[in-house]
């Protein structure tokens, strides 16, 4: 089973960050399925069948990126939809009196969101996307072995807690376990 399928079932936040990374991997290979197959998929110890499955999966993503106009930047509609679902769920959680801990965590993270927007984050994106962009940005810095300031570390720790709570509520909601009213 693909990592993406497993993550989508267990942790929607990790799934989304993983999918953003996959989008960047595809871009790194110039959206060329032949290059992805030859230079990326072949590096792994997959069976021939697994390599074919991976090639098909990447091929579908490449086609979507081409047709959706996100070869160079932006996100696939399937990933935008996840952000939208999370944003809508967050709004529901915040408007309900049944989730005081989520509400509290949101207000702990809100100053960081405001600060990120002051520093150039897209003011047109929703707050949840701003959080994910911060998480992804720091993840990329760490992969590049670049230093992250203590203030940024603190902000990311709070954002991680907030998005983790939202991710947990998302899974409960998908299972029908989340009740907004009595």
Image (cartoon, helix red, strand yellow):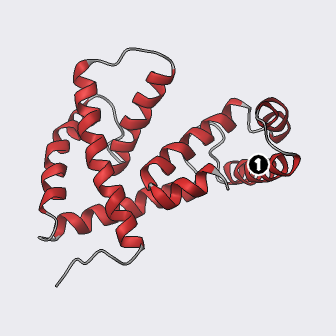
- Image side of residue 85 versus residue 5, left or right: left
- The residue that appears at 81% across and 41% down in the rendered structure is 33
The location of residue 102, given as percent across then percent down, is 19, 57
**Residue 177 lies in quadrant:** bottom left
Rendered-image quadrant of the C terminus = bottom left
Q: Residues within 10 Å of mark 1 (few under 14, many from 20)?
A: some
**Residue 155 lies in quadrant:** top left
Q: Identify which residue, 103 or 111, lies in the foreground.
A: 103
The residue at which mark 1 appears reads as: 54
User: Could one spot residue 162 in this view of the protein?
Assistant: yes
The location of residue 105, given as percent across then percent down, is 17, 50
- The residue that appears at 41% across and 74% down in the rendered structure is 175
The location of residue 162, given as percent across then percent down, is 26, 48
- The residue that appears at 63% across and 36% down in the rendered structure is 72
- Image side of residue 119 versus residue 144, left or right: left
Could you say whether the residue bearing mark 1 is in a helix, strand or loop?
helix
Q: How many marks?
A: 1
The location of residue 161, given as percent across then percent down, is 27, 45
**Residue 158 lies in quadrant:** top left
Rendered-image quadrant of the N terminus = bottom right
- The residue that appears at 11% across and 70% down in the rendered structure is 97
Is residue 80 placed above or below 27 in the rendered structure? below
User: Could one spot residue 74 in this view of the protein?
Assistant: no
Q: Identify which residue, 168 or 70, lies in the foreground.
A: 168
């Amino acid at each position: 089973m693909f990592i993406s399928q497993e993550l989508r079932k267990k942790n929607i936040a990790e799934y989304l960050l993983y999918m953003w990374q996959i989008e960047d991997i595809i871009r790194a290979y110039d959206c060329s399925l032949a290059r992805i197959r030859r230079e990326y998929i072949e590096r792994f110890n997959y069976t021939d069948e697994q390599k074919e499955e991976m090639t098909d999966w990447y091929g579908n993503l490449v086609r979507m990126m081409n047709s959706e106009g996100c070869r160079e930047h932006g996100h696939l509609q399937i990933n935008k939809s996840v952000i939208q679902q999370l944003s809508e769920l967050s709004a529901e959680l915040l408007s309900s009196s049944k989730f005081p801990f989520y509400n509290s965590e949101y207000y702990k993270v809100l100053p960081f969101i405001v600060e990120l927007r002051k520093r150039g984050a897209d003011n047109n994106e929703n707050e949840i996307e701003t959080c994910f962009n911060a998480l992804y940005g720091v993840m990329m810095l760490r992969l590049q072995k670049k230093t992250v300031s203590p203030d940024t570390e603190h902000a990311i720790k709070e954002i991680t807690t907030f998005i983790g709570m939202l991710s947990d509520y998302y899974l409960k909601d998908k299972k029908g376990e989340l009740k907004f009213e009595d």
